[in-house]
Amino acid sequence: MQKKGIIVSGMRPTGALHLGNYLGALENWIRLQDEYECYYFVADYHALTTGYDNTDDFKNNITNALIDWLAAGLDPEKCTIFIQSNVREHAELNLLFSMNLPLSWLYRCPTYKDQINQLKDKNISTYGFLGYPCLMSADILLYKAAYVPVGEDQLPHLELTREIARRFNFLYNCEVFPEPQPLLTKAKVLPGLDGRKMSKSYNNTIALSDSPDVVRKKVMSMVTDPQRIHKTDPGHPEVCSVFAYHKLFSPEEVDEIEHVCRNGEIGCVACKKKLAENIEKFMTPIYERRQDWLKRTGDIMDIIKKGNEKASSIASKTMAEVRKAMKIDWI
Ligand code: TRP
Ligand code: SF4
């Protein structure tokens, strides 16, 4: 089948992915791999921009990210999976872009101020952290991506990427870089087990790697409508995170659940049991694929080697064009 265009996306390897990450990004990646020529990479350089001071878990995190991706359903026959730092051209293009990138373009990225405020206990007043949108632009433009699936928070970076592409083509009077378009899909937002945002730091996640048993226990521990004490009390599904999950995992039953909850015709325990069953159905194939990949770590290495080679062959071609355009192709 003729594929529709090049897509590039990366994800930082920051530990076990959770169901929220799956619905927010990975599900989308998996859907796109059939239609587009997709390059998906483990953004380990990006992880260094905030986590440069502790790299003990680095290798493990990368392996786990790969297993999560494969278990979720990324198919190495359909897309190219690689590790950013294994394709050194990412670093080279980042360097060359940095030569003409105005600092003001970086300072105005909203993620910069947000993260500086959020990660107060960390020193991220670094050159690398300020420059990470430049690195991200290099990631994307190296493959001349037509589309980039991103969340809303990353849109300013994509705009920056387009500006960097334009500036490069203008400065060196060439047409090396096309301007990539964002592929925005409405992110499905899943609250954490306690109703707050799902986040590892709150310890309220369902990990993609959780076994069916663990998933069931976690669901049964979820916080529901605090005003309900007896099962005949009328419930308020809009404040209940179990209901938020039902909307995503029980599409056929959700209207009925809303009705019986509001009328006090179902207990929260029964309601959670139903949810546990549906999430389990959803996660079982992921769990089974994981068991299979865990036995095939050698194959995972081969997949990455092949992916690195494929990515490198494109990246090195682009870099040859870049050096030529910049007239730094002496030999
Ligand atoms: N910056 C993204 C994030 O932190 C990850 C990322 C790095 C990325 N390079 C990319 C996403 C290129 C899309 C395209 O979530
Ligand atoms: Fe939430 Fe279900 Fe209880 Fe209603 S019945 S409050 S939706 S857990």
Image (spheres, rainbow, N blue to C red):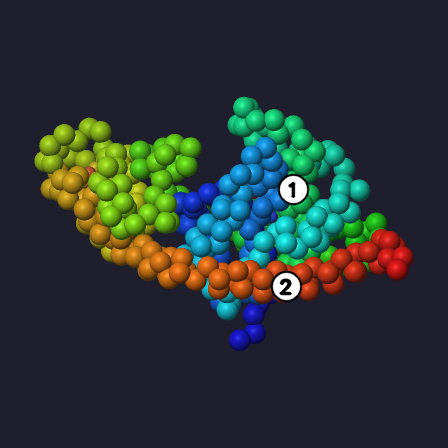
Q: How far separated are the C-alphas under marks 2 and 1?
A: 25 Å
Q: Which residue is mark 1?
A: 133
Whether residue 256 is visible to the viewer of this picture, yes or no, is yes
Look at label 1 and name its amino acid: Pro
Residue 155 visible in the picture? no
Classify mark 1 as within 8 Å of ligand 1 or not, answering yes or no.
yes
**Residue 135 image offset from top left, x and y in percent:** 67, 45
Residue 266: x %, y % from top left: 13, 42
- Could you tell me which secondary element the residue under label 1 belongs to? helix
Q: Which mark is residue 78?
A: none
Q: Is residue 141 above or below residue 52?
A: below
**Left or right: 178, with 205 as reference point:** right
Tell whether label 1 touches label 2 (CB within 8 Å): no
Residue type beneath disc 2 = Glu
Q: Position of residue 252 (x, y in %)?
A: 24, 56
Label whose residue precedes the other's in the sequence (2 or 1) = 1
Is residue 45 positioned above or below 124 on the image? below
Q: Nearer the viewer, residue 111 or 88?
A: 88
